[in-house]
Image: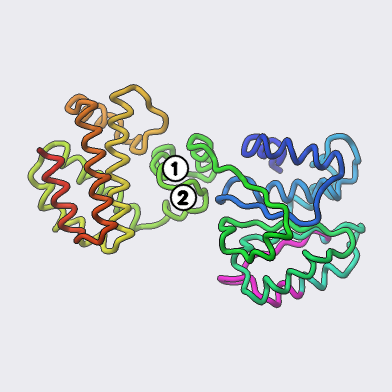
Amino acid sequence: MINIEEKLNWLQPILFKQFKKTVQQKQLAHAYLFEGVSGTGKKELSLWLAASLLCQEGTEKIPCEKCQNCRRVFEHQHPDVIEIIPDGLSIKVEQVRNLKAEFSKSGVESQQKIFIIEDVEKMTTGAANSLLKFLEEPEGSAVAFLLTTAKQRILPTILSRCQLVHFQALTKKKLMLELETKGLSINQASLLVQLTNSVEEALEMNENEWFQEAKTIAWKWFTLITNKDSQSFVYVQTTIMPHFKDRDAHRRLLDLILLAYRDVLMIHYHTVDVLAYARYQKELDHIKTEYTGTVTIQAIETVLLSRKKLESNVNAQGVFEQLVLQLMK
């Protein structure tokens, strides 16, 4: 079993320290809303807190992570820890009714009951309204942890009845390490962490065939442009437009090109943090010798201006063709 405490110390050191103190002082509230992008430790902290309430050892190190109760909590097998996830695309009113029925019961093995509701923003209106009664009038020794990546979609009445806890997004380096533990290579992760702060979204993008082809096309276009190859203009019509078919895709293309120029700039000024195109380090080093820092900055500004044109609903093919001409001057 993984060491949850060690992981939380790594993911959310400040927040975890605060909650350890809260647990030691026995000052947990009855309802929390944990909000932040996926992969930031929301579920891990809710399980750690559940275990702290059910731990059998009663030592200063709470939870001990070794006793039977702790193990069952972390293995999702404790009868007094009820976890709810969306049924399909939403959390339905029947799920919350069942949850409320559980609230009215004593714990199976203790007086304590813990409820963890993931993706709470996906509750139907009926389900959300049904949950309000417990949040207004909690019964017995029950604690609820509501987890969300989109607090703006949650009813204000629910927000007002929970203690809101924000989970900081992971740094790019931490996100890369997290993705590596999920089986991604450094080369795969290095680009993804530039495009999202979410572990879940990064993993989805990595499995997306359209995205895999998109990044290959974007890099080829970038190399054609930086080599001042006249084919870069034709490439827009023959390859880019057939693959990048809507506004979101058009924006994604410019993001990918922008990251390539950013890599060149970081290499030029020796300020490399995480290269988006780490797998093309040699090619980037060569391009750096052909571009001054000033020229690279101008190229970045040109790409950003093209992004603004897209937002103004200017024809995408025209924007991309004009971008080629400007970058190849």
Residue 82 is inside the magenta segment: yes
| Left or right side of 157 for 317 | left
Mark 2 closeness class: few <14, some 14–19, many ≥20 residues within 10 Å: many
| Left or right side of 43 for 31 | right
Which residue in the protein does label 1 denote? 193
Looking at numbered disc 1 in the image, what kind of residue is underneath it? Val
User: Mark 1 or 2 closer to N-term?
Assistant: 1
Question: Which quadrant, please, contains the N terminus?
Answer: top right
| Element on which disc 1 rests | helix
Tell me where residue 27 sits by quadrant: top right
Looking at numbered disc 2 in the image, what kind of residue is underneath it? Ala
Marks counted in the figure total 2
Residue 139 percent coordinates (x, y):
87, 65
Residue 81 percent coordinates (x, y):
79, 58
| Left or right side of 329 for 198 | right
Q: For the magenta stretch, what is the residue range?
A: 80-97
Residue 225 is inside the magenta segment: no
Q: Residue at x 71, y 39 (%)?
A: 16
Q: Residue 279, relative to residue 197: is it above or below? A: above
Tell me where residue 185 sits by quadrant: top left
Residue 91 visible in the picture: yes
Residue 202 tag number: 2
